[in-house]
Amino acid sequence: MEARIRRKYDRRILPIVTVVYLLAFIDRSNMGNARSLGMTEDLNLIGNRFSICLTCFFITYVIFEVPSNILCKRFGPKIWLSFIAFCFGLMTMCLSTTQSYPGMIVVRTFMGSAEAGIMPAISYMLSTFYRRHELVTRVGIYASFASLAGGFGGLLAIGFSKIPAWGIIHTWRNIFFFEGIICMISATVCYTFLPASPETATFLTEEEKRIGALRIRLETLTNSQNRLKKLHFKLAIFNVKTWLNALGLFCSLLCMNSIALFMPSLLNSMGFESIYSQLMTVPPYACGTIVCITLAMLSDRFKIRGPILFGIAGPLILIAFAILRTVENTGVRYMAIFFATCGGFTGSPVFVAWNVDNNAGPMVRAVSSAFSISLGCLGGILATWTYLPSQAPHYEVGHTINLCAGIVVTITAFINSMLFRWENKQRDAGKRDHVLDGLSQEEVEELGHTHPSFRFTP
C-alpha cells in the first residue's frame, strides 16, 4: 500500500516541484550567461556592479525565507508555491526590459523576495507527503535539477539569444523574457495539479488518503500543529544541530552558487571563447545531476546523511578547489570543475533534507527548514563576491574561499553525524525517558524530535 502511494506521489508531485525549482534556478543562474552575451555593456555594469546586482538578490532572498515558509504553512504549499512561482516569473520577464543599472538592482531585489520561499517550501511540502527516509531521494531529485539547470540554462540562453531582435528585446533580453513566461505558465500548472495534502489528493483512494496522512503523523510523533507557538521556534532554532547544519549548508551553497554564477567566467579564464564556454558548462552539470541523484538514493537506502557529506561531497569540493588554486593545466582544471559541481550540488540538498529529516512536527519543520536555508543562503551572498573581474584570470582568492568552505562542510557534517549517533544511543539506553514525566497528552504530542521515541538520522 505504501509503495503504491509513493509511486502516485512520484508521478504527480515530484515532476511539478522539480520543474518549478528547475525554472527558479535557471532564472537565478542565467545572470552569468546574460553577462557573457552583452548585458554588461548594455547596462554599463562596470567594476563591481555585476556582483552588487547578484548580492541584492540574495539579501532579500535571506530576509524573506522564514516569513515565506510560515506563510506557506498558513496558506498551504499548493497556493503559496504557485503564487511565488508566478511572482518570480513576472520579475524575470521584467529583467528583459531593464534599461539601467539602478533598474537591474530594483528588479533583482524583488526577485530575491519572490524566490526566497521556493526551496524551503518544496522541502516542507515533501515532508508532509513522504516519510523521513524517503525524503533525501526526492529532495535530491528536485535539487539535482539545479545542476541540470546550469547546463540546460546555458543551452536555452544560446537558443533564446539567437532570436532576432524585436522592439527593445534582443540577445540577452530574450533569455529573461521567454523564461519569465515559461515560469508563469508553470505556476498555473502548479496551482491546477498540485495536491494540498494527502487527505485532499484526488488521485488517491479514500483508504490511501487515510494511510498517507497517518504514516506522516505517526512518524513525526506530533499533532498537526495548526497554530504557530513559541515552543515551535524554540525546537526549531535553539538547537545546536540546526546551527551546525546551517553552517554546513552555508559553505555548500557558497560553492554551489560560485559554480552556478561564475562557471562561464572560470571557463573563459581557461581560454574558451564566449559561446563555446556556454557549451562547456553542460557536461559538468550533467555529471553533477547524475552524482547527486545516485548519492541521494544511497542516502535513503542506507538511512545515512553525514557519511555522504563528510565522506564524498566535502572532499570533492576540497579537492576541486585545491586543483583550481594550484594547477595550471587546462584539462586538469576542467576536471576540477566536474568535482566542484558534483560536490557542491550534492551537499546542498542532503543538508536541506537532513535538517527536515531530524525535526518533527509540521510547524517546527517549516520554521527550521526556512531558518537553516536562510542562514545557508548567506553563502550565496558571499558567492557573488568570490570571483571578481579584478582577480581574473587566476581567481586565487575565490578558489581559496571555496577550498576553506569544503573543509568546513566536511568537519560540520562529521560533528553533526557523531552528535546524532550519540543522542540515539542515549535514547536507546532510556536516558531520555524522564522527559515524559508529568506531561499531558497534548504536551507529549508537542515534543516532536525531543520525544524519547524519536530517532535521528546520522
Image: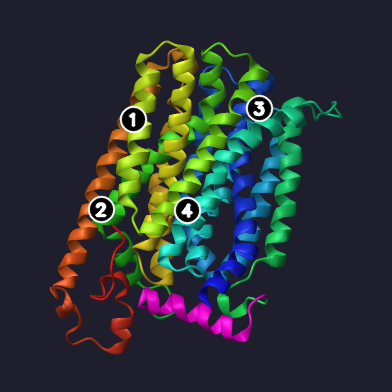
Q: Where is mark 2, residue-wise?
A: 417
Mark earlier in primary sequence (2, 3): 3
**Residue 34: mark:** 3
Question: Which quadrant of the figure contains the N terminus?
Answer: bottom right
Could you give the CA–CA distance between mark 4 and mark 1, rounded to whole angstroms? 28 Å
**Is residue 230 toward the left or the right of residue 65 in the image?**
left
What segment carries the magenta color?
203-222
Q: Which residue is mark 1?
A: 318
Q: Which residue is mark 4?
A: 65
Is tag 4's residue or tag 2's residue first in the polypeptide sequence? 4
**In the image, residue 309 lies in the stretch drawn in magenta:** no
Q: Along the polypeptide, which appears first: circle 4 or circle 1? A: 4
Q: Give how far apart the Cα atoms at labels 3 and 4 are.
A: 26 Å
Q: Is there CB contact under 8 Å for labels 3 and 1?
A: no
Amino acid at the residue labelled 2: Ser
Query: In the shown orientation, is residue 311 left or right of residue 44?
Result: left
Q: How would you rate the neighbour count of disc 1 (Cα within 10 Å): few for under 14, some for 14-19, many for 20 or more?
A: many
